[in-house]
Image (cartoon, grey):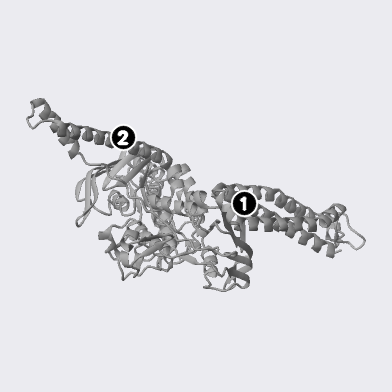
Amino acid sequence: MPVITLSEVNKSYGSRVVLRSVELTVRTGERVGVVGRNGAGKSTLARIVAGIEHADQGTVMRRRMARIEYLDQNPIFDGNPIAEDAVMSGLRDWHSAVERHRHISARLGHGHGEFEALIEEQAKAAEEVERLGGWERGHHVAAILDHIGLARRKAQVDELSGGERRRVALARLLVSSPDLAVLDEPTNHLDAETIEWLEEFLIETYQGALLLVTHDRYLLNRVTTRTLEIADGEAFSFDGGYERYLEQKAEREAHQARVEQNRQNFLRRELEWLRRQPKARTTKSSARIARAEDALAQPKPKSELVTQFNLDVARAGKTILELRDATIKIEARTLIDNLTLFALEGERIGIVGRNGTGKTTLLRAILGQLTPAAGQVVVGANTKIAHLDQNRANLDDTQTVFENAAGDQTRITLGRESIDPHQYVERFGFDRHQQRQPVTSLSGGERARVALAKMLRQSANLLLLDEPTNDLDVQTLGSLETMLVDQGVTALVVTHDRWFLDRVATSILAFEGDGKVVLYPGNFDSYKRLRAEALAQRKPVDADKAKGQDKDREPTTANTTSGGLKAAELPRKNKRAGLSFKEQKELDELPAAIDALECKATELTEKLASPGTYTQGRDAINAVQSDLLACKTELDQKMVRWEDLERKKSEN
């Protein structure tokens, strides 16, 4: 059964046509993903479906009594409630149904009113409660708040950050369990762990229909059953999630290319025939001319504008970036405890972790905006840093797109290429008319592209990217991924985009809380596997420790000594400190093993710095980088073990 149907919907802003003759039906339980370039009209379509905006032409038919809830990119709350109350307001209809059932039940208990009529009303109220999520619906609120990561539940919403307000709005929508949820970029400001929970919630728990506008390709691929692409004002529907959408789109474009090639071949043959014929024409030749004219009048398929990113990669020195036993604190809170990290040329380190654990703080320390409490942050003498902050604060809102992106340069140099500034800005998807727009008039994704254009016009050999994927469309994300990988860019990237990290990252720096930061080799998928393995190995050890502690606390018997104390209350003698024979043997062998690993790490570092390595191709470079990361990880483990054994030996 359809929840909503759009027919021949048109929407314009001034002379700009955003939606043209759009057809869309969303049925009960259906999950529709919406994709398209920034500014294509995805959010406009979402707002029309939600009833926030109205179509200029066409019809929008909503099912009677259907509840449609909308997650805005910039949510507004009436009355400035505290966060917890704002979330609970999503259960307003549920509370009303429960209260109505309670009231009718009380009247029945006191014999007030006609018995049969009250029984019928009570049944209807109970049915409404079940329709809205069941009798235990109120208990789900706390669980959703825990998973959504909202810490300041008692704060008023006006005191919260933009990201926190988005979490409140998302939690409010989820607890309300509408017939159709319209989610506009729900993953912005969420960490990867929370996004994974949201993904599972939408698949396993949420029962309603879904219209999902997002750049998160993992979310699209796992959650959606149909994909709607908005391009040039039109809507194109594809069965399946994001991966199936890509396959069908490639097939469609290949078909269009074949049709266009056939049309061009036909026109070429007809033009050659026309040139050879005398001026006098027969009826048959006139018909042939008409067919040629019809073919000539057919519009050529529109070629999709592809954003191109390039970086003028400056020559780097031997040292690009090093953190040596760095400890970073904000006030009394330790965000990073004793971190040692080496950024190698061509390495792309993805930085993940829950919000507030210190990911952006690490970038600030590298930029020299704050000083470590201990240890060092060493930036190489030849290192040139280009930084993209998550708030796009490097943009001047008083200037146009062109003034921000190109500055006052008359030519922009990218490696060996020198191009006109207007052509440079066009590479980021802005035509000459759009370049004259003030940046204040742009969408979030368009602002992100301007910020990237401004950052990439400079020469650099180290990129610090803080949430670069927020608001960017999937086509632009693909172009950014291609630049980072194909040009061998050295980068530290803070992002929650799992698809992006799987495509780009050579290692993952995970902020695990309480100052613990761990480097894992490989992409995000490798990180998840390695972390799961580490947790699985840790659990039996933790269980054994807990078992041992329980045993220590357990009374042995009720026997008493001459002093009248229970045996369990007698002071214990400590176990004899020192090393076992096996541990002593291990300690004796560790120095040689550490020396060998240090030599190997030095050799691999030199190999990675050698120009000859880079003539062997990307696979050879990745192999050396992986070997070096594995070597350093093993070296760190050996050093920790050596220190533990030496400490234990000294306690003897």
Horizontally, residue 4 falls left or right of residue 531, namely left
Question: Where residue 382 sits in the image (x, y, percent)?
Answer: 54, 68
Circle on res. 501: none
Q: Are marks 2 and 1 in contact (CB under 8 Å)?
A: no
Q: How many numbered circles does the render carry?
A: 2
Horizontally, residue 529 falls left or right of residue 563, namely left
Question: Where residue 248 sits in the image (x, y, percent)?
Answer: 37, 37
Q: Secondary structure at mark 2?
A: helix
The quarter holding residue 472 reads bottom left
- Of residues 635 and 217, the one drawn nearer to the viewer in this rendering: 635
Circle on res. 258: 2
Q: Work out how far the residue at label 2 is from the one at label 1, CA to CA, in angstroms.
A: 43 Å
Q: Secondary structure at mark 1?
A: helix
Horizontally, residue 459 falls left or right of residue 25, namely right
Q: Residues within 10 Å of mark 1 (few under 14, many from 20)?
A: some
Residue type beneath disc 1: Val
- Determine the residue positioned at 32% across, 57% down: 426
- Of residues 542 and 23, the one drawn nearer to the viewer in this rendering: 23
Whether residue 72 is visible, yes or no, is yes
Q: Quadrant of the N terminus?
A: top left
Residue type beneath disc 2: Arg
Q: Earlier in the sequence, mark 2 or mark 1?
A: 2
Question: Where residue 136 sits in the image (x, y, percent)?
Answer: 47, 47
Q: Residue placed farthest to the left in the image?
A: 280
Q: Quadrant of the C terminus?
A: bottom right
Whether residue 29 is visible, yes or no, is no
Residue marked by disc 1: 624
The quarter holding residue 162 reads bottom left
